[in-house]
Image: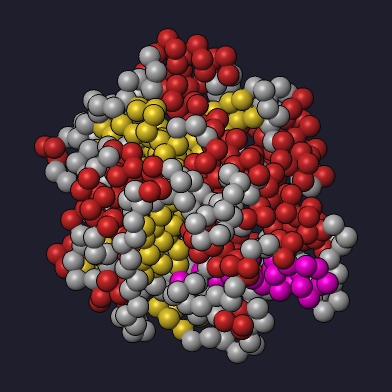
Amino acid sequence: MSERQTLLHTVALVVTAALAHGTAAAQLQELPASAAYGNYAVGVATGFAVDNGQRFDPWNATYGRPEYRALLRRVEAAGQTRTVVFQLWYPAPPDTSRGRLARSRSPFPAASGRRAHYNDFYFQGGGVLSRQVGAAAQVVLPEFIHLRSGGTLAEAEDAARAAAFADIGQRILGASQGAWQDAWAAEGKFPLILLAHGLAGSHGMWSSLGEFLASHGYVVAAPTFISDGGLPLVFHDEDSPFAKKTPPPELQKAYELLLGEVKVVPYFYRLLFGQEGRGFAPPENFDPATAKVVPGGVERATSMMRNLLRQRVSDVGLVLRTVRLLGADEDTCRSALAAMGATSAARPTATHYLCNLLNGRIDAERVGIAGHSLGSMTAQLAANHLPGVRAALGLNNAPPFAWTPAEMFGAGVTRDGLPVGSRSPLLLLIGDEDDFVQQTFVSLFQSAVAQAGGDPTQAFPLAAERAAPDRMDNPQPVALSAWLRATSDRVLVIVRDTDHFTLAEDFARLFPWPAFRRGELPFGQTSQRVRKPTGTAAFDPPAAPGASYTQLGWAAVGDAGSVYLPHVIRDWYARAWFDWHLKDDADARSRLRGPDPFGALTAVRREVR
């Protein structure tokens, strides 16, 4: 046992108080002081990481649809190699004469630069982007983005539906941020945190967490992965060989193909059942009573997920190498990035070069990583595989043991006799009403496989991953299993009345609670949800709907006014976690080991040395 492990001791706190229906917001009387934004203003910039030694999209070259593989052939014939777009948030000098902004945004205007908007993250994207952003927002906020058709939606109304998505997409893209484009970087040397999105996500989903961490003295980088990202705007790179050789109408069609599909789940159905899936749902002709798992299907689907996670970890490593170079001196940065093919990072924006924006500002030996959903899996694996990454934070998911590439976790067993999991410090935050994870890991990978004549133990070899979920003690068996197998500092936070998206996605903060409650939003509905089935019913959900609950969201808290509670909880834990592991902040360690400040909103298990 390592010296670090011998220093571990258990500080157990499991909150079991019942939370009355609809009263979640009333449980928090005031915000913890450390939940406030820091005193730095926040700058934001966009960069491209390029790997000339890698194909443009190796994963989809194997698994993609024929139309997508045809696009890859055209892109690669133009000379374009692997390209990953990423967003940077960084500490900037504040203009204190202009005062603090609202608590829900970064705290100060910057002394230089202009106020950023979502459009800056998406390069003033056109119709295809606004539709994509609107569709993504509907998944997160169906109550806000409801098309009032006066009846059921028919196929003939698809155009109106697309128009509604485009409208809400434009509202989001035009929304102002708390960061400042082209701001000067503050003096100092700051740890680096990487943020990995989930399936079909993008770097734009991280603006609130990116701003919060940067305001407390971190450089934050968030990539959009080509393999499964929703908005990988790689052809906006000034050095894109494909963009230089492609007329604008054809480039738009290429983007529509690149952005228009969520690929992983359909490919799973194809490999496992020999059928093509549609989005997150089974194909319309999928009948568990008659479907059969094709020979070798479980192994091929599992191998696909391992390969996807390998690709994502590789992309995180590419962005990590690129951002570390931005912290080097300007000549080293420019020559090294030119050798990689990422010369656009050394070209001027309005006020600076990326290669001189952050030189001397990044502590390249103090790196953390966080992620949501598939990004949470990515973060946990990257923390164990990439050199210099000290700690991981995962939201709403963890990698099943079978999906974990063998080279990314060590062999052996834990002191409890379980296969070894994360060796790096691991903080997991999960929602107790995460029906998406339950649908994926229980309904899809276990029940459907079993009903179709397959062996679910091939996909989930650990008994703990196949356990019947309950609401608070074990709402996500795969996540709990990953936490139990972690061998370093570990904290598990279960957030009540929270689904798969609200801890991570940024769209919700565009719709402040008072306006929502007054019904002033054109798409405003209610934040009512139906509880997911638990116990044995999770494997065979009843036809009758479950009880309703109020999704945790905006609330009036003490003197703070209206705050978005899921992000307050996430930000408090993220700051404490990274302050302890990246800054050696003893006060942050005390916060992690002390009483949880969120009372009945959370249940916490922890082992912190």
| Residue lying at the far left of the rendered structure | 97
* Residue 450 is inside the magenta segment: yes
Chief secondary structure of the magenta span? helix
* Quadrant of res 580: top left
Residue 227 visible from this viewpoint:
yes
Q: Between 57 and 321, which is closer to the camera in this rendering?
A: 321
- Kindly identify the residue that appears in the image at 58 percent across and 19 percent down: 340
Q: Between 333 and 387, which is closer to the camera in this rendering?
A: 387
| Residue lying at the far right of the rendered structure | 295
Q: Between 385 and 45, which is closer to the camera in this rendering?
A: 385
Span shown in magenta: 432-456
Lateral position of residue 144 relative to residue 268, left or right? left
The x and y percentages for residue 46 are 45, 32
The x and y percentages for residue 132 are 57, 52
The x and y percentages for residue 475 are 50, 72
* Quadrant of res 600: bottom left
